[in-house]
Amino acid sequence: MSNERSVRTEIVIHASPAHVWEVLVNPKYVAEWDELPEDYPKERMTVGSKVIWDLPNGEQSITKIIKADEEKELVIALLGTGWEMKPNEGEVAYHYNLKAKDDKTFVTICIGDFSLIKDGQMYYDASVEFAENAKTTIKRLAESLQD
């Protein structure tokens, strides 16, 4: 049995994968369901796009898009510069998977694996709340883009 600590949640969005994708990669929308620095560029995020947060203790929390299969899959690696154990890039990540069905998009969000880092339970607990809030905001935004 695996000790994996990953948050998994799903939601059905009454919008096309194109609209959901727009909400996932356009900073204008991302800022509504996730935090972005005030001076973050306005261009759509793509592979290599990073968000770097300077933490009060001098460390950094870094997210980086490592896979962007348009309208299908988005993978954003997470790294804390102060983590004692340094997982390989992508081993701790946010995964957004989109599947179109009729006029809806089925979205699966998986965040983790937090068993790979010290204090992983703290990150896991925070990610449970993040995932629930993010998916409902992503749904609201994507559905508002429908014609």
Image (tube, rainbow, N blue to C red):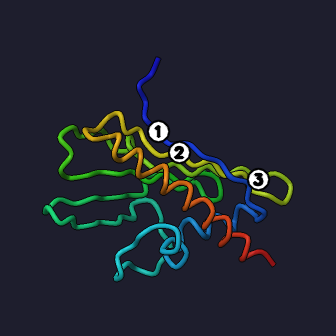
Q: Amino acid at mark 2?
A: Cys
**Could you tell me residue 108's position as x and y percent?**
62, 47
* Residue at mark 3 to residue at mark 2: CA–CA distance: 18 Å
Q: Amino acid at mark 3?
A: Ala
Looking at the rendered image, the quarter that the C terminus falls into is bottom right
Q: Does dot 3 land on a helix, a strand or a loop?
A: strand
Q: Residue furthest left?
A: 58
Give the numbered dot on residue 100. 3
Q: Residue at x 53, y 45 (%)?
A: 110
Q: Earlier in the sequence, mark 3 or mark 1?
A: 1
**Could you tell me residue 120's position as x and y percent?**
32, 40
Q: Residue at x 76, y 64 (%)?
A: 16
Badge count: 3
Q: Residue furthest top?
A: 1
Determine whether, in the image, residue 19 is placed left or right of residue 132: right
Q: Earlier in the sequence, mark 3 or mark 2?
A: 3
Disc 1 target residue: 6
Indicate the quadrant where residue 64 lies: bottom left
Of residue 128 and residue 34, the one placed in the foreground of this image is 128
Q: Residue at x 60, y 59 (%)?
A: 135
The 10 Å Cα crowd at callout 2, few under 14, some 14 to 19, many 20 or more, is many
Q: Relative to residue 126, is residue 28 depicted above or below? A: below
Q: Relative to residue 57, is residue 111 depicted above or below? A: above
The 10 Å Cα crowd at callout 1, few under 14, some 14 to 19, many 20 or more, is many
Q: Amino acid at mark 1?
A: Ser
Instruction: Find out whether the residues at labels 1 and 2 contact each other: C-beta distance under 8 Å.
Output: yes
Give the numbered dot on residue 110. 2
Q: Residue at x 57, y 49 (%)?
A: 109
